[in-house]
Amino acid sequence: MARFDAVVVGAGPAGSTAARELAASGARVLVLDKSTFPRYKACGGGIPLRTERLLPFPIDVVVEDSVNLLEVSLRGRSGFVRDSGSPFARMVMRDRFDDLLLEWACAAGAQFRPLSTVRVVDSDSDELTVRCDDSFEAQARFLVCADGAHSPTGKMTGLGEGIAECAAWEVEFEGSATNRARWSGRAFVDVGYSPWGYGWLFPKEKHLSVGMVLPGDNARELKGRVAALAERIGVATEPTAISRGHKIRFRRENEPIAGARALLAGDAAGLADEFTEEGIVYALQSGRLAARNLLRALDCGPGLASYQEDVNSEIMPELKAARYMAGLFYAGLRRGGRGWFTAARLMPGLWSAFFAVQRGESSYAREVTRFWFVRLARRLQSS
Ligand SMILES: Cc1cc2nc3c(=O)[nH]c(=O)nc-3n(C[C@H](O)[C@H](O)[C@H](O)COP(=O)(O)OP(=O)(O)OC[C@H]3O[C@@H](n4cnc5c(N)ncnc54)[C@H](O)[C@@H]3O)c2cc1C
């Protein structure tokens, strides 16, 4: 049976990052994924500059657009545009982006085995054994569960219980030249869904990615609402290349994401924020933290509790601040409707703060302490 220092399940951004950093430090790493790559992943493919900055290699070859304009509307009406002055996000199709990340992991020395759906994880005190549906088996000292929001290996290892979730739907329209020119350089978001959620259009080279995120209880509304949004913004008649739903998970407190020999990274650990529902930035961060802690454990013996501590101190403050911002934003929309939307539209500081976070020049954790009305709301809540 093949033996490794670490087996990484899932070759998305979290798994490929963990694998690249482990292999670059000399660890023997096997990456297993149920798909062949490149593979489609339901995702807006918005890569804010703060995400791009975490990668030690250029992603230009897979960038399909760069956006500096943000168009915001309230259920398709009262739209306004804010200009960040310079790009705040890149736009990618995830099949190409994830393939690039995996290529770098393999170039660093990680082995990749596609079409390997992990069905069983057995562990004893010294090692883990991973079994795939084609009866392939591998042994490893440690396991990185980077298998996305459903995280079957998280369940097999008893991790990730209690993580909240919501639902999202994505449609890739084959944009006509006219529509692609209309949306190029511009990200579009549509707010005003109750109790919370938003729709988007993100421009790509050949596609217009239109999607929506809503609470899990509203999952059944998603398809119809995305279709209505596409109609309102004039892309509904474009041919549909692909449409798919996926859940997004949110870790809110101290839910277990590390055991003696296994840890969860990225969506498997619920590391997505509740303001924009982005997860790639936290997938990269947690992949790096996973590698750092696994390398330590390979030297000093089992026990990955330090990974959970690192996630708690380095990622959770940002997720909690984003959740707080989302709470304020959506409560304002629910109670104040159009009045609140107009007030938000007239606050230039709000949009420059958003752009600064997207560019990695600030953070949600910093911004929640900067605005007087956010400070006031926090004080009222805690009194
Ligand atoms: C509709 C939608 C839009 C989004 N838009 C954005 C956005 O614009 N920007 C952003 O930053 N984030 C966005 N997100 C979130 C983002 O997609 C995730 O946070 C990100 O993909 C997490 O990466 P990951 O590596 O943890 O997991 P994934 O990218 O989901 O990768 C998990 C991998 O595990 C593999 N796998 C699963 N089960 C098994 C198994 N049993 N055995 C082997 N392999 C397995 C899968 O094939 C997959 O390749 C969006 C999410 C959704 C649903």
Image (cartoon, rainbow, N blue to C red):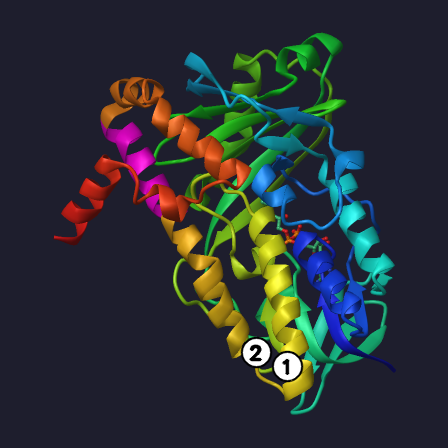
Q: Earlier in the sequence, mark 2 or mark 1?
A: 1
By secondary structure, the bulk of the magenta-drawn segment is best described as helix
- State which quadrant residue 240 falls in: top right
The quadrant in which the N terminus is found is bottom right
Q: Position of residue 327 (x, y in %)?
A: 32, 41
Mark 1, residues whose alpha carbon is within 10 Å: few (<14), some, or many (≥20)? Answer: many
Instruction: Kindly identify the amino acid type of the residue bearing the numbered disc 1.
Output: Ala
Read off the magenta span.
322-335
Q: On the image, numbered disc 2 is attached to which residue?
A: 304
Q: Are marks 2 and 1 in contact (CB under 8 Å)?
A: yes
Q: Is mark 1 within 8 Å of ligand 1?
A: no
Residue type, mark 2 in image:
Leu
Residue 162 occupies quadrant: bottom left
Residue 206 position, x and y percent, is: 76, 22
Q: Secondary structure at mark 2?
A: loop
The residue shown at (59%, 56%) is 285
For the image, the number of numbered tags is 2
Instruction: Identify the element where label 1 is drawn.
Output: helix
Q: In front: 266, or 345?
A: 345
- What is the spatial separation of the Cα atoms under label 2 and label 1, in whole angstroms? 7 Å
The disc placed on residue 38 is none
As for residue 327 lying within the magenta part, the answer is yes
Name the residue carrying label 1.
Answer: 297
Q: Residue 149: in sight, yes or no?
A: no
